[in-house]
Amino acid sequence: MKKIFSPAYRQDYLKGYSIGLNPFQQFNNVKKNEAFVTGFNSGRSDYERMNGYISNGIPKRIVTDKVLEDFLVAGLLGLPIEADGYTSHQINMIEKWYQSGIEKYDPNLSVSLFEILEENGILIN
């Protein structure tokens, strides 16, 4: 039985995944093992889920999991968001995450956070 989750497999998978997430990089024909190809396909799928198909063009701003988490936190804290420079596909994705944060919004949490930030000299408008 083949160990598909060996350290070597994982390493090649992650290399492929990171290349797949980058819309400016193409598939590397030199590296044709199963782990790399699977990782590349998974990374490209995640990129296109968040940013739309590459065949439709590469947007000015790239949405990543980190960007989506930032919008979720903004919704949790009731902060306004700026969506300039995003495509309609990206805005739909962002809205889902922001809305999820709004549904969990607790005004008391925001007030407490703003007080802590203010005590540390950080002002938020």
Image (cartoon, rainbow, N blue to C red):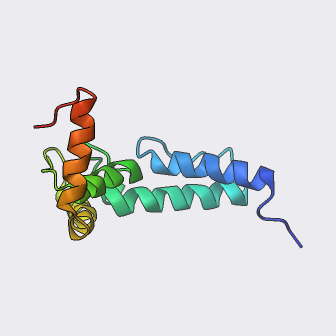
Task: Please say whether residue 107 is visible from this viewpoint.
Answer: yes
Foreground: 104 or 47?
Answer: 104
- Residue most toward the left? 125
Q: Is residue 120 above or below residue 27?
A: above
- Residue at 86% over, 68% down: 2
- Residue at 22% over, 30% down: 122
- Residue most toward the top? 121
Question: Picture coordinates of residue 21 (x, y %)?
Answer: 47, 50
Would residue 19 appear left or right of 125 to someone viewing this image? right
Q: Quadrant of the C terminus?
A: top left
Q: Quadrant of residue 89?
A: bottom left
Would residue 80 appear left or right of 11 to someone viewing this image? left
Foreground: 105 or 100?
Answer: 105
Foreground: 113 or 47?
Answer: 113
Question: Picture coordinates of residue 41 (x, y %)?
Answer: 54, 60
Question: Picture coordinates of residue 109 (x, y %)?
Answer: 25, 56
Would residue 91 appear left or right of 8 to someone viewing this image? left
- Residue at 44% over, 60% down: 46
Q: Quadrant of the N terminus?
A: bottom right
Task: Please say whether residue 32 is visible from this viewpoint.
Answer: no
- Residue most toward the bottom? 1
Question: Picture coordinates of residue 102 (x, y %)?
Answer: 20, 65
Q: Quadrant of residue 68?
A: bottom left
Count of marks, rendered view: 0
Foreground: 100 or 112?
Answer: 112
Would residue 20 appear left or right of 74 to someone viewing this image? right
